[in-house]
Amino acid sequence: MYGPGFADDPAAAYRRLRTHGPTAPVELAPGVRATLVTSYEAALHVLRSPETFSKDPRRWRDLADGTVPMDSPVVPMMMYRPNALFTDGEEHRRLRGAITDSLARVEPNTLRGYVERSADLLIDRIAPRGEADLLGEYAQVLPLLVFNRLFGCPPDLGERLVEGMSGIFDGVDAEKANAILTETLLDLIALKRARPGQDMTSWLMAHPAGLTDEEMIHELVVLMGAGTEPQQNLIANSLRLLLSDDRFAGSLGGGSLPVEDALDEVLWADPPMANYAVHYPVRDVVYEGRLLRSGDPLVVSLAAANTDPALTTSDQRAGNRAHLAWSAGPHNCPAQSPARLIAAVAVEKLLDRLPDVELAVPVDELVWRPGPFHRALASLPVRFPQLTADPTPRPAPAPHDPRHDPPPPPTNTQAPSPAPTPTRPTGAWARLRAWWRGE
C-alpha cells in the first residue's frame, strides 16, 4: 500500500483485497504487516467496539519486539502518543473533552471570516497570472493560514510545524520530521504559557483536564494532523471533481455552486484520509472466519468501506452523510463541522473569484502522492483568464485580542530582486514560507 501503483488506482487494490473477505492482509511499508478492513459492516463493528479493539499502539507487538524498527516511515503516524487519538476509556474521554470543549469556542462566523480573507489573499496572488497549481498555491496554504490563526502560531513556527507534519505524512525521513514537530510544538507551548491569547492552544492549556506539556504536544499533533493534510486533500479533491465531472461543470461560474454535493461525493469516494483508524485486538478474535491476532494492527479502510459493493448507490448519494470519512464510534472526528466549513468556503470562494477556471491537463494525467494513509494529489494545475487583483488591501485575519499576540517575525527590509518567472519552492512548508515573504 505504499507504492505508486496503489496511489494510482487504490480502487483496484480494494477490489482485489475484497476477495479475501471483509478483512485482508496488507503491507503498509516494507516489513510492516497489518490487516485492512474493507467492508462497511466490518468497519462499523471495529469502530464501535472499543472493548474488543483498542486504539492504544502500545499493544502493537511487532513494534514492541523490534520487528518493525522505530525508523520505519509509518511509525510516526502509528506510534503511541498521549492524546485523544491513541487512548481508550476514561483517559480518552478526558483528552477528547479538552479538544471538543476548545473547538466549541470557535465561532463558525469568525472561522468563515478567516477562511474568506485567507482565500482572497491567495487568489489575489494567482489571479493576474492566468495559471496556478491549486494544490501547492491554494489548497495546501489556506488551511495553514487558518490553522496558524486559530492556534495563535506565528509564521516562523508555522513553517517548522508544516515541515515536520508534511514529513510524517509522506514518510520521508520520518524520525527527523517527528523531532522537528516535537521541538517546534514545545516552542509554541512555551510562547503561549508566557503569553496566552484567544486561541486553541491557550484554551487547551486552560482546560480543566489539566494537560501536561507532553499531553499538550500530542493533542496539538492530532489537531494539526487533522487540520492540515486531510483538509488540503479535501479541498483539492473537491476542486478536481468540480472541474472534471460533467455533472458539476454546467453550474460553475453562475448561481449556486454544487459545492456541498461535491464534498459529499469526495467524502464517500475519495476521503482525504483513506486508510487509518488503526486498532489492535485486545485478544485473539475470529471475525467472519479470519483470525485477528491480539496486538496486530487492524487498519480500517475508510475509502474501501465507503465503496463497499454491499452498499447501494442510494446509500452513497449526495446529501447522505453516513460515510466513514470522519470515522465512527467513540473516536470519530470531533472537528467535522469546522473542517467541512473550511473546505466549502475555500472551494466556493475560488470558483466565485475564478469562474472560468479549468484543468490544465486531462484529469487522468493528474498524479497522486504515494502513501498508505492519505488520498492526496501531487499537484492540481489549472488555467483561467487573467484577472486584475482587487486593489483593496486585504489584511490577514486579525486577532481577537492584539495585546496577547506574539510579536511579528522579523521582516526582510531588502527589496526582492524582480524576476519575470520566479522559481517556486516545493513542499507545503516551503510554499507557506514563500507566501509569507511575498515570493
Image (cartoon, rainbow, N blue to C red):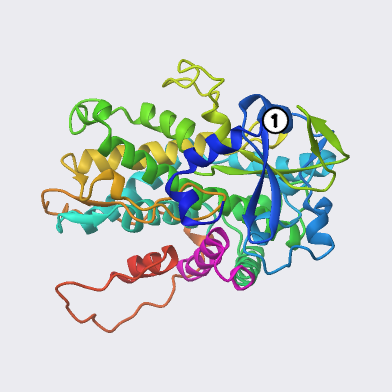
- Residue 302: x and y in percent read 58, 36
- Residue 62: x and y in percent read 79, 58
Q: Is residue 174 left or right of residue 250?
A: right
- At x 20%, y 50%, the residue is 360
Q: Is residue 356 left or right of residue 429?
A: left
Element under disc 1? helix
> Residue 53 magenta-drawn?
no
- Residue 86: x and y in percent read 74, 48
Q: Residues within 10 Å of mark 1 (few under 14, many from 20)?
A: some
| Residue 365, placed above or below residue 17 | below
> Which amino acid, mark 1?
Gly
Which sits in the foreground, 147 or 377?
A: 377
- Residue 136: x and y in percent read 35, 58
- At x 26%, y 29%, the residue is 248
- Exactly how many numbered labels are in the figure? 1
- At x 41%, y 52%, the residue is 368
Question: What secondary structure prevails in the magenta region?
Answer: helix
The segment highlighted magenta reads: 154-177
